[in-house]
Image: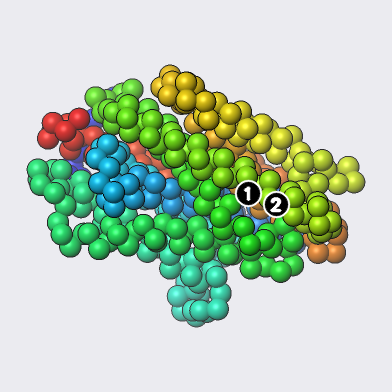
């Protein structure tokens, strides 16, 4: 089936070469970072996690969200998700790959990553995050490729794949839960020290990931004969709606807990993000934009008429993706570091090399997704299942 990635239209080749070129530009800046160090980034002693970790955090949720189509299809026999399931699993493969690459560039000396394997520390959440991420990547490779190979052969996936399919469902929850525990387990950071961090992560994942999947499906649908069916699209739109409402509700719980109880440490980060502290307010317009987009999307998604409008739905998905990307990325990460435990404010914004490296990683991830989607479409077309 791999040979199908080598045959395509001029638009397909143009996209592949464009993404490859962008990746090479990002790789060039990464080489500069290796030579100079993390000093070319905007990170500092007070803000030691920045744009890289923000993208990692967001993309873990995108990867975990594949369970939103896998679970109904395999556990509840929801046949309408049949055509979409493989695309969800392939999106997870690209997202996890990007997650791992963002960790690679976030380590000052990349070779130190091997210390996680050479000197395992079972009491560290990073150790478990390494296990669940690599495990989830392997599981989705097995499940997605086996399912597609079954379509290619005109048969069902082999029985030995079933345990991996069922394992992928709790594993999807685990990768984002463990990532949430990375933050919630740090007692010196009040903004992250909350029991609802993991539920917030999952809620935002289950709205942002399916929203991104729907956008990709719309793009594929526009350039190919693939059509998952209106019923599948509308069902996934409902999932996005419920998850987005849960995400906003959990943030409201955070606001009540911090301000009604008067916890200063928790209040400072929220005030910095939404109102600024002592004149420091770089992220204020970003955060208000994020929540304005999510609120508008939530209101329009709740209304059946607008949610079921297949022409308007892509715009609503874009609002969800952008809003959650800002909130769960820069808002969550930087908000946890500002102010520091000594109440000192050190603001952070990514530098140009940082952004270029990140764009390069996104290009690599979407190149993987493009190739996998091309193979899937070609196989489905050859078997007449689309």
Q: Is residue 128 above or below residue 384?
A: below
Q: Residue furthest left?
A: 154
- Element class at badge 2: helix
Residue 337 in the image: x percent, y percent?
Answer: 74, 57
Residue 248 in the image: x percent, y percent?
Answer: 62, 42
Q: Is residue 135 above or below residue 149?
A: below
Residue 112 in the image: x percent, y percent?
Answer: 53, 70
Badge 1 vs badge 2, beta-carbon distance below 8 Å: yes
Q: Quadrant of the C terminus?
A: top left
Q: Quadrant of the N terminus?
A: top left
The structure residue drawn at horizontal position 12% and vertical position 35%, both measured from the top left corner, is 383
Residue 217 in the image: x percent, y percent?
Answer: 36, 32
The one nearer the camera, 289 or 252, is: 252
Can you see residue 41? Answer: no
Marker disc for residue 165: none
Report the residue marked by disc 2.
254
Report the residue marked by disc 1.
250
The structure residue drawn at horizontal position 60% and vertical position 34%, both measured from the top left corner, is 294
The image's colouring method is rainbow
Q: Is residue 200 above or below residue 284?
A: below
Count of numbered marks: 2
């Amino acid at each position: 089936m791999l040979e199908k990635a080598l045959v395509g239209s001029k638009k397909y080749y143009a996209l592949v070469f464009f993404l490859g070129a962008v990746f090479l530009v990002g790789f060039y800046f990464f080489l500069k970072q290796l030579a100079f160090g993390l000093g070319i980034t905007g990170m500092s002693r007070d803000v030691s996690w920045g744009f890289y970790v923000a993208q990692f955090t967001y993309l873990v949720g995108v990867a975990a969200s594949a369970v939103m189509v896998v679970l109904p299809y395999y556990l509840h026999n929801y046949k309408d998700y049949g055509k979409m399931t493989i695309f969800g699993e392939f999106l997870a493969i690209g997202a996890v790959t990007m997650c791992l690459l963002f960790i690679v560039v976030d380590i000052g000396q990349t070779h130190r990553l091997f210390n996680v394997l050479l000197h395992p520390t079972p009491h560290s959440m990073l150790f478990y995050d390494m296990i669940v991420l690599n495990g989830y990547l392997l599981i989705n490779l097995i499940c997605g490729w086996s399912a597609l190979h079954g379509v290619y052969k005109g048969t069902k996936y082999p029985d030995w794949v079933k345990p991996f399919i069922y394992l992928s469902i709790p594993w999807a929850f685990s990768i984002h839960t463990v990532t949430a525990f990375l933050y919630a387990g740090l007692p010196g950071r009040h903004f992250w020290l909350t029991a609802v961090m993991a539920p917030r992560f999952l809620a935002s994942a289950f709205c942002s990931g399916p929203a991104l999947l729907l956008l990709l499906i719309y793009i594929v649908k526009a350039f190919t004969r693939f059509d998952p069916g209106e019923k599948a699209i509308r069902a996934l739109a409902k999932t996005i709606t419920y998850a987005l409402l849960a995400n906003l509700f959990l943030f409201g719980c955070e606001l009540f807990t911090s301000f009604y109880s008067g916890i200063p440490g928790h209040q400072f980060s929220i005030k910095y993000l939404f109102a600024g502290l002592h004149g420091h307010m770089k992220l204020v317009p970003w955060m208000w934009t994020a929540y304005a987009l999510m609120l508008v999307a939530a209101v329009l998604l709740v209304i059946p008429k607008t949610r079921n409008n297949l022409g308007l739905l892509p715009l609503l998905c874009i609002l969800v993706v952008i809003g959650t990307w800002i909130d769960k990325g820069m808002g969550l990460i930087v908000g946890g570091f500002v102010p520091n435990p000594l109440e000192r404010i050190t603001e952070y914004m990514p530098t140009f090399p940082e952004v270029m490296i990140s764009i390069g990683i996104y290009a690599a991830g979407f190149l993987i997704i493009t190739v996998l989607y091309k193979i899937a479409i070609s196989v489905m077309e050859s078997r007449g299942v689309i």
